[in-house]
Amino acid sequence: MRRNFEEELTSLHHYFSEMGLLVDEAIGKSVKSFITHDRELAQKVIDQDYKINEAELLLEKKCFELIALQQPVTSDLRRIVTVMKACVDLERMGDHAVSIAKSTIRVKGKERIPQMEEKIDGLSIKVKMLVQLVLEAYLERDDQKARKIAESDDAINTLSKEIFEQSIKEMRKNTNLVIGGTDYLLVAKNLERIGDYVTNICEWIIYLETGKIAELNSKHIN
Amino acid sequence: MSKVTIKELNLFYGKFQALHNINLPILKNEITAFIGPSGCGKSTLIKSLNRMNDLVEGCTISGEVKMDDENIYAKECNINLLRKRVGMVFQQPNPFPMSIYDNIAYGPRTHGIKNKQIVDELVEKSLRKAAIWEEVKDDLKKNALSLSGGQQQRICIARALAVDPEVLLMDEPTSALDPISTAKIEELVIGLKKDYTLVIVTHNMQQASRISDKTAFFLNGKIIEYDETRKIFTNPKKQETEDYISGRFG
């Protein structure tokens, strides 16, 4: 009976990792589409989002089944709860990738600000790296690494704020930039929110390993 | 507040040491669960709390078990009075082969209560406390052995309550019962803790996690871990506890 349960837990782990890769890919493509003004790529991100949603539903269904059938306790229960909570955060990250893709489609052909796009590119590289690191920390069940990753969220918030302020300044100078500039605000906000969800997953990794429910960077959570 | 305090208790069956240096508080008006694999000493310990092990040939005990401030292993301890204060319910329902009424009245009568009105009141009160009054009130003369297993077990609980104990020991009280009877007993046990201190030995991990306030995990005659039940079942400190309650061994 225990062996069967172990196999089920392992498969849960694999499904979660696969979902993580889908989300990572969606974030990468959405930002790339925004920076390179690639509407087709943006449309692909939107069209493929159903895969992330389905992965979340599948994971939740499997978690409910395991709880009902195996009545897990201690670290087994924490493994399942972590997947159940973290897959919701992953799905939301996917939604933010879709929002960035929608901005790409909306902003195409409008007047743009190259130096702002460079900044957004820089921010996206940092966010994407955090997403990859948090997935690694989950796989390695490394709560120390999770704490360090959450600390990096400060830099994301600072960069996002800079983009916000500079975009507004540029829009004030040239009103033709308002439509394109508004999307810079939106994209920066979406990237910042993805960073917040990374922090949430860090909290679940700490719970998984220590049994303690931690609140990291609470001042940044909206 | 501790109702029973076990200090440095060692118990031997002949040369075999069944309990090793047990230190444990049993808190008043709480349910303490003893869990652990077969032969780990949990039933031996529960039987030490009302000196039932005295009946086992070759059994020797050192250390002390204090109920309130009285050492129950002191020479001057009255065993009959102790067993009145510490009631016990066993795995197999074991009503006496007599009527429901006489089963419950048996204890009070042996303690000298002869007045019919008082005995009647005690019978009703005990059956109500054991959540079986409504089911049997119209036929108290019925032989207790003709009841279902779940009802028989509640009769046994009522019988234990009739002598007004302070502590109730339960050794796997639901392992011979169906899920509905089990649920009734569990609900009853939770209700009893406002008036009594309860100790329950169980092999059913979900039962321990559902009803107990504290849990002690036993292995090879030792207490490996004792803590709040919610901590034991969500984040135990010892690997052996984790392995046992999650089904990795035992």
Image (cartoon, rainbow, N blue to C red):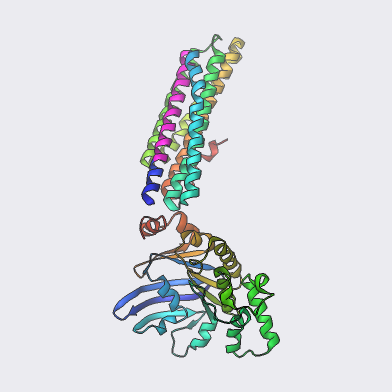
Q: Could you say where residue B213 lies in the image, as x and y percent from the top left?
A: 52, 64
Q: Is residue A23 within the magenta segment?
A: yes
Q: Residue at x 54, y 76 (%)?
A: B167
Which quadrant of the view contains residue B127? bottom right
Q: Which image quadrant: the C terminus of chain A?
A: top right
Q: Residue at x 45, y 39 (%)?
A: A202
**Residue B26 is covered by the magenta coloring:** no
Q: Where is residue A194? Give x, y as percent.
A: 50, 30
As displayed, is residue A214 above or below residue B115? above
- Residue A191 visible, this angle: no
Q: Is residue A92 left or right of residue A209?
A: right
Q: Nearer the viewer, residue B17 or B113?
A: B113
State whether residue A45 appears in this view.
yes
Q: Residue at x 65, y 78 (%)?
A: B140
**Position of A38 relative to B129 (above/below):** above
Residue A21 % position (x, y) = 41, 29
Is A6 or A46 nearer to us in this picture? A6
Q: Quadrant of residue B60?
A: bottom left
Image position, residue A27 (x, y; %): 46, 25
> Magenta residues?
A11-36
